Structures are given as structure tokens and as C-alpha cells.
Amino acid sequence: MLDRLIEKNRIWAHQKTEIDPEFFKRLVAQQSPEYFWIGCADSRVPANEIVDLDPGELFVHRNVANLAPSQDANYLSVLQYAVQVLKVKHILVVGHYGCGGVRAAVESQGDSLIDHWLAPIREVAHSHQHELDAIGNDVARLDRLCELNVISQVRSVALTPIVAKAWREQQPITIHGWVYSIANGLVTDQGVSVGSLEDRQRIFDI
């Protein structure tokens, strides 16, 4: 099976250079994406393909349930590189409906490493318990929690000293919250785009 993947790689590289002979030369010369994607590690959510961007146009960080935890050095290092070195203009926090991580956060027994990682989602569920309890359908309830999780992670990104410093220095960065539907391939903007400290105060009252 690995030989098959290598062969597919050769075909892909050949097709790229057939269409655009300078494609890989440009990639080697510079990485200058305008977009930073924080998404779920789910194999059904391919970041570049969803928004039809080539390699080099989208800087990507993925983990289980698209979290942006303030204690995760890996995520924070990637965020700092995206903001301070690459100077991205847009940060896209992208969840997806039917997320197994979101489901696990509310259904698991809380006694494993993944449960520790998913703790922020349980906190979101607790904070919105009345809204979620009012949704009678289990699938719809989890889908709404996927949306609420994305909104919470946008807030988390906006609270980082990395982003706050960039805003104070007038660096143009806007954080967006999207949810992707595996069922139809479409993203839905959650309407919480934050592009300044003033936006943060207005949207999240912080």
C-alpha cells in the first residue's frame, strides 16, 4: 500500500508540473500564505481542498476537535510563527459537523488522555447546557455544540498575547469561525469574525 502512495505522489507531481512548470520552484523560493487554518485532524476535512488553495497558500495546524488551548505549546508556537513570521491576514478556526472529538467530549467517561484534551469542550457544553438541552434531536444537539466550540476557540485565539500584540501594533489580522459540513462540502460562517481589540470587546465582552 505504501508503494501505491509513492506512485500516486509521482503522478501528482507530474500533473502539477504539466499544468504549471514553475509550481515547485515557486514553493521552494517562498512560503507566504495569507491564511492560517486551525482545524480538526479528521481525515475527511482536507484543509487546502475545502477552500481550493494550492500548497503554500494555506498554513495549517490540526488537532482533535480543532482546539486552541492556551496551555498547548505546540499550537501556540504555530500561531506565533503564523502571526509574527508569516504575517498571515486571516486565521480560520474550522470545526465540522459530526466531529468525533466533540461527541467523545460529552459521551466519554473522563478517564483517559483524550478526555483531558477535550475538557474545554465539556466546559462549553456546561456553559450552554440550557440551550443544548432544549434541542430534542441528538444529532442537532451535537452539531450545535460543534458550532459553540468553534466560537469558543475563536475567543481563545483572540485572547492570546500573540494576537493582542499584533492588533496593538496595527497588524491586520482577522479571526473567523467556520463549521464545515462533510455531508455537502460547504462551510458556514458563524458570524464571530474578530479583527481588533475593539471587535473582541464588542463580540465577546472581554
Image (spheres, grey):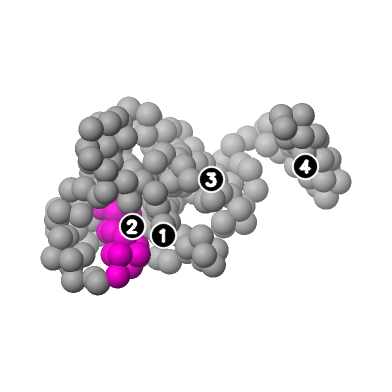
Whichever of labels 1 and 4 marks the residue nearer the N terminus, that label is 4
Name the residue carrying label 3.
43
Label 3: element kind: loop
Residue 63, quarter of the rendered image: top left
Question: Residue at point 18% right, 71% down?
Answer: 134
CB atoms of marks 4 and 3 within 8 Å: no
Image position, residue 131 (x, y; %): 18, 67
> Circles 2 and 4: CB distance less than 8 Å?
no
Q: What residue type is labelled 1?
A: Tyr
State the residue at coordinates (77%, 42%).
12
Q: How far apart are marks 1 and 3 (CA)?
A: 13 Å
**Mark 1 highlights which residue?**
97
Q: Which of 32 and 181 is in front in this view?
A: 181
Q: Can residue 125 be seen in this view?
A: yes
| CA distance separating discs 2 and 3 | 17 Å
Whole-number angstrom distance, CA of label 4 to CA of label 3: 19 Å
Picture coordinates of residue 129, whole percent (x, y):
15, 60
Verify CB contact (< 8 Å) between mark 1 and mark 4: no
Circle 2 residues within 10 Å: few <14, some 14–19, many ≥20: many
- Farthest right residue? 18
SS under mark 4: helix
Q: Name the residue under label 4.
A: 12
Q: Are marks 1 and 2 in contact (CB under 8 Å)?
A: yes
For mark 2, give the secondary structure.
Answer: helix
Q: Which of marks 1 and 4 is in front?
A: 1
